[in-house]
């Protein structure tokens, strides 16, 4: 826990803090979604997609911690992964237009200017 606190306190820019919060929340949501999908008995394909997306977010988290000089590039990768992979895949797997997933595309619209251009 001390290491996490030390890493968090070492992040100076708001852009990087938003990046780490977004990636961390995405990982937690992936875990909850995976457990929910297993309990509902959804297909293995569905579970693998959710696990893969969670693993991609975990990779972005580790790379952001390991390579602080590359965080601007990682923020761009995060936006691309979320807006062009995570949200569309989740949209189709969760029932399309009849699900609440369409609201998450608003998060994607918010992330683009914050992650790429800064506050």
Image (cartoon, helix red, strand yellow):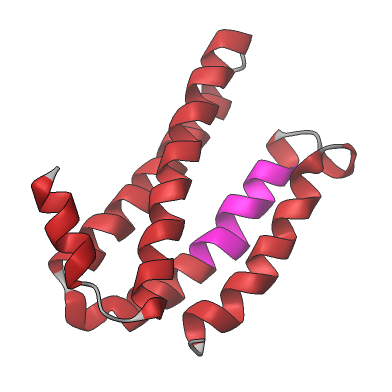
Disc count in the image?
Answer: 0
Rendered position, 11 above or below 31: below
Mostly what secondary structure, the magenta segment? helix
Q: Residue at x 88, y 44 (%)?
A: 97
User: 94 left or right of 41?
Assistant: right
Which segment did they paint magenta?
A: 80-91
Residue 61 drawn in magenta: no
Residue 83 drawn in magenta: yes
Where residue 69 sits, quadrant-wise, is bottom left
Rendered position, 109 above or below 52: below
Q: Position of residue 76 (x, y in %)?
A: 44, 77
User: 119 left or right of 66?
Assistant: right
Q: Nearer the viewer, residue 82 or 43?
A: 82
Q: Position of residue 116 (x, y in %)?
A: 49, 84
Rendered position, 20 above or below 44: below
Q: Residue at x 59, y 18 (%)?
A: 43
Rendered position, 5 above or below 94: below
Query: Residue at the bottom extreme?
Result: 117
Q: Residue at x 26, y 79 (%)?
A: 12
Q: Position of residue 95 (x, y in %)?
A: 80, 34
The N terminus: image quadrant = top left
Where residue 14 sits, quadrant-wise, is bottom left
């Amino acid at each position: 826990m001390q290491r996490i606190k030390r890493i968090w306190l070492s992040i100076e820019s708001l852009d990087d803090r938003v990046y780490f919060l977004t990636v961390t929340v995405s990982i937690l949501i992936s875990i909850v979604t995976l457990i929910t999908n297993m309990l509902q008995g959804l297909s293995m394909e569905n579970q693998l997609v959710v696990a893969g997306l969670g693993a991609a977010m975990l990779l972005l988290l580790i790379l952001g911690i390991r390579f602080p000089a590359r965080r601007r590039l990682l923020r761009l990768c995060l936006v691309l992964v979320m807006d062009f992979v995570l949200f569309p895949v989740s949209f189709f797997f969760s029932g399309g237009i009849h699900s609440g997933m369409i609201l998450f595309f608003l998060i994607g619209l918010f992330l683009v200017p914050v992650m790429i251009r800064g506050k």
